[in-house]
Image (cartoon, rainbow, N blue to C red):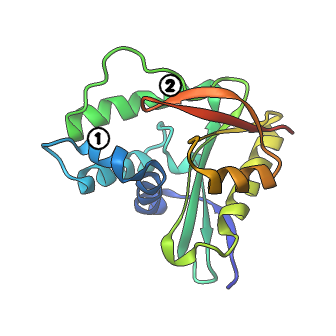
Amino acid sequence: MDVRITEANASHAPYIGKAITMAIGDELVNGLAGEKHTPDDVLELFAHLAGRTDSQYSYLNSLVAVDENEKPLGVVIAYDGADLHRLRVPFFEEAEKKISLKIEGEPADETGPEEIYMDSLAVFPPYRGMGIGRKLIEAAYEKAVKSGKPLGLLVSKENSNARALYESLGFKAVGERPFAGETMDHLMKTT
């Protein structure tokens, strides 16, 4: 299969939304849905945010792996950590409207201005194990190199498979950061 990494466009929004829900996992998706909403409502929220130009989940911050027929196989979302506060405002606004999620106070920052942050990465199930995730990470790293900043990401302490992949690509642990109530390991690959 011929795999190419390309800049996402607005038509990729549904795939980006699906990738985000896959990346955050069923437990967090169900937590966001709560008792009044469904996982499909959460998927719709992220797809809507992916179609916007001002969101951290925007297609403008996304790269898509496609096959020779332009079928999306996986997605990576990466953006400048310096833009986090501005980019997450649409999430707060839309989450309250679409899934009745009210964010109280200012959540802890999962990234900072010192890095390009790899927010989400997912390869759709039929295409896993084919090196597509690696290609998406490498493309996100190239984006970071062009910016002059390292590429950073968070990984769950229990996710040894992801950690092994990241370390094989040159990422090093640089500390810990909070995300969704969990302390995660902060890894970085310098330029």
In the image, 40 versus 125, the foreground residue is 125
Q: Is residue 105 above or below residue 95?
A: above
Tag 2 residue: 86
Q: Quick one: label 2, few (<14), some, or many (20+) residues within 10 Å?
A: few
Left or right of residue 148: residue 159 = left
Residue at image point 39% right, 32% down: 90
Q: Is residue 64 visible?
A: yes
- Quarter placement of the N terminus: bottom right
Tag 1 residue: 32
- As shown in the figure, which amino acid type bears the numbered disc 2? Arg
Left or right of residue 7: residue 90 = left
Residue at image point 30% right, 36% down: 94
- As shown in the figure, which amino acid type bears the numbered disc 1? Leu
In the image, 55 versus 158, the foreground residue is 158
Instruction: Tell me the mark number nearer the camera, choosing from 2 and 1.
Output: 1
Secondary structure beneath label 1: helix
The x, y position of residue 146, in whole percent, is 82, 42
Left or right of residue 94: residue 156 = right
In the image, 26 versus 105, the foreground residue is 26
The residue sitting at the top extreme is 105
The x, y position of residue 108, in whole percent, is 49, 20
Q: Quick one: label 1, few (<14), some, or many (20+) residues within 10 Å?
A: some
Left or right of residue 75: residue 35 = left
Residue 6 badge: none
Secondary structure beneath label 2: helix
- Quarter placement of the C terminus: top right
The x, y position of residue 189, in whole percent, is 80, 41
